[in-house]
Image (cartoon, grey):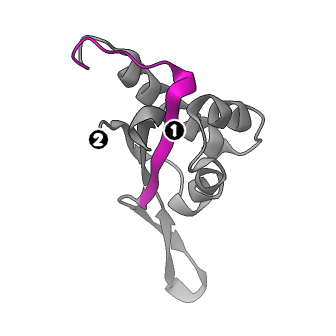
Amino acid sequence: MTTFTARHKNARMSAQKVRLVANMVRGKYADEALDLLRYQPQRGARFLEKVIQSAVGNAADADQNGGQSFRIEELVLTDVRVDGGPMFKRIRPRARGMAFMIKKRTSHITVGLTPISELS
């Protein structure tokens, strides 16, 4: 089974926020998913949109796929994962000499596209 993947590692947004929009497009056609994400106000939708466009570009590249290129209408999002990445840890001074930890979270966004002809 041919799967075309694209990955954005260390995206400067928490995985929890990106998962909200990832759950919305999982299992949809690639062109339909891009149309949905274009009108979403969340910042995570921009990250996911770029990763899907990159995966579509990988599928359209005939040189890598043994002479066969796939159009965007025939691709389905079969694997949409948002995993937590490394955290930047910062210290915030608090009262009476204490310090609180601030965790600036990152995420790894992975998208896998499969041609509809190979799903059935």
Look at label 1 and name its amino acid. Answer: Val
Residue 55 lies in what quarter of the image? top left
Which corner quadrant holds the C terminus? top left
Q: What separation in Å lies between label 2 and label 1 (alpha carbons)?
A: 13 Å
Q: Residue furthest front?
A: 120
Front position in the image: 34 or 76: 76
Q: Residues within 10 Å of mark 1 (few under 14, many from 20)?
A: many
Residue ID for mark 1? 76
User: Helix, strand or loop at disc 2?
Assistant: loop
Q: Which residues are magenta?
A: 65-83
Q: Residue at x 61, y 56 (%)?
A: 23
Q: Residue furthest bottom?
A: 96
52 is higher (above) or lower (below) than 89 = above
Image spot of residue 57 (x, y percent): 42, 20
User: Helix, strand or loop at disc 1?
Assistant: strand
Which corner quadrant holds the N terminus? top left
The earlier-in-sequence mark between 2 and 1 is 2
Q: Residue at x 57, y 33 (%)?
A: 30
Q: Residue at x 51, y 38 (%)?
A: 76
| Numbered badge on residue 1 | 2
